[in-house]
């Protein structure tokens, strides 16, 4: 039996205030999955509310962006949240675009949405702000994300070490 892969149609654009509840829902699902890898990701009781408030402020900031991948102008399939950091006083690389979160709904993964979000972030937001690099953090046990970022030419540069006290 032949299977014909139907092309998924979606568009990427800046998120608006009305998108925040859908984005927070996606983020919460991703955080719960991360919590299964590492208990430090377990949200506090009002964690999703705080994240929503954080995103509402970010929407109005010139140095932050939230891009959404949306199907039929209603279903948010994924999002990327990032910001510009230009605080380095000592190093040549001064302006960095940092990706804080990227999430694609589990039913729509491996369809190019994450790649499109990353490329739009890089070619649009990061370039607009003259960033010379893009940074992000990834959990070492998140093998799917590690493979995805390596495919996009990210390379490991630093390791975060934590000591519980």
Image (cartoon, grey):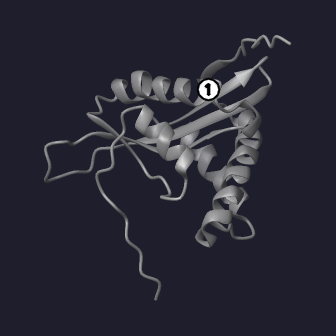
Residue lying at the far right in this picture: please name it: 1
Residue lying at the far front in this picture: please name it: 1
Residue lying at the far bottom in this picture: please name it: 165
Residue 24, given in percent of the width and then of the height, sits at 71, 47
Number of residue marks? 1
State whether residue 24 appears in this view: yes
State whether residue 64 appears in this view: no
Residue at image position (63%, 59%) is 34
Q: Give the vertical position of 50 relative to 117 (above or below).
A: below
How many C-alpha atoms fall within 10 Å of the one at disc 1: few (<14), some, or many (≥20)? many
Residue 165, given in percent of the width and then of the height, sits at 46, 89
Q: Nearer the viewer, residue 34 or 53?
A: 34
Residue at image position (61%, 26%) is 113
- The quarter of the displayed image where residue 112 is located: top right
Residue at image position (14%, 49%) is 91
**Left or right of residue 95, residue 2 in this image:** right
Residue at image position (48%, 41%) is 147
- The quarter of the displayed image where residue 94 is located: top left
**Left or right of residue 64, residue 161 in this image:** left
Residue 114, given in percent of the width and then of the height, sits at 57, 31
Q: Give the vertical position of 86 relative to 37 (above or below).
A: above
Of the 4 image quadrants, the one containing the N terminus is: top right
Describe the element under mark 1 as helix, strand or loop.
helix
- The quarter of the displayed image where residue 107 is located: top right
Q: Which residue is mark 1?
A: 113
Residue 28, given in percent of the width and then of the height, sits at 72, 53
Q: Nearer the viewer, residue 13 or 114?
A: 114
Q: Nearer the viewer, residue 78 or 94?
A: 78
Q: Give the vertical position of 103 relative to 72 (above or below).
A: below
């Amino acid at each position: 039996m032949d299977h014909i892969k139907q092309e998924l149609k979606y568009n990427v654009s800046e998120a608006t205030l009305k998108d925040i509840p859908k984005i927070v829902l996606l983020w919460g699902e991703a955080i719960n999955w991360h919590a299964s890898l590492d208990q430090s990701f377990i949200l506090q009781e009002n964690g999703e509310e705080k994240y929503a408030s954080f995103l509402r402020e970010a929407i109005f900031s010139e140095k932050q962006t939230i891009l959404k991948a949306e199907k039929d102008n209603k279903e948010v399939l994924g999002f990327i949240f990032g910001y510009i950091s230009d605080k380095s006083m000592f190093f040549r690389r001064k302006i960095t675009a940092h990706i804080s979160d990227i999430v694609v709904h589990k039913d729509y993964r491996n369809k190019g949405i994450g790649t499109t979000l990353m490329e739009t972030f890089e070619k649009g937001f990061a370039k607009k702000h003259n960033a010379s690099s893009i940074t992000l953090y990834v959990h070492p046990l998140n093998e799917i994300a590690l493979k995805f970022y390596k495919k996009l030419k990210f390379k490991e540069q630093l390791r975060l070490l934590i000591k519980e006290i």
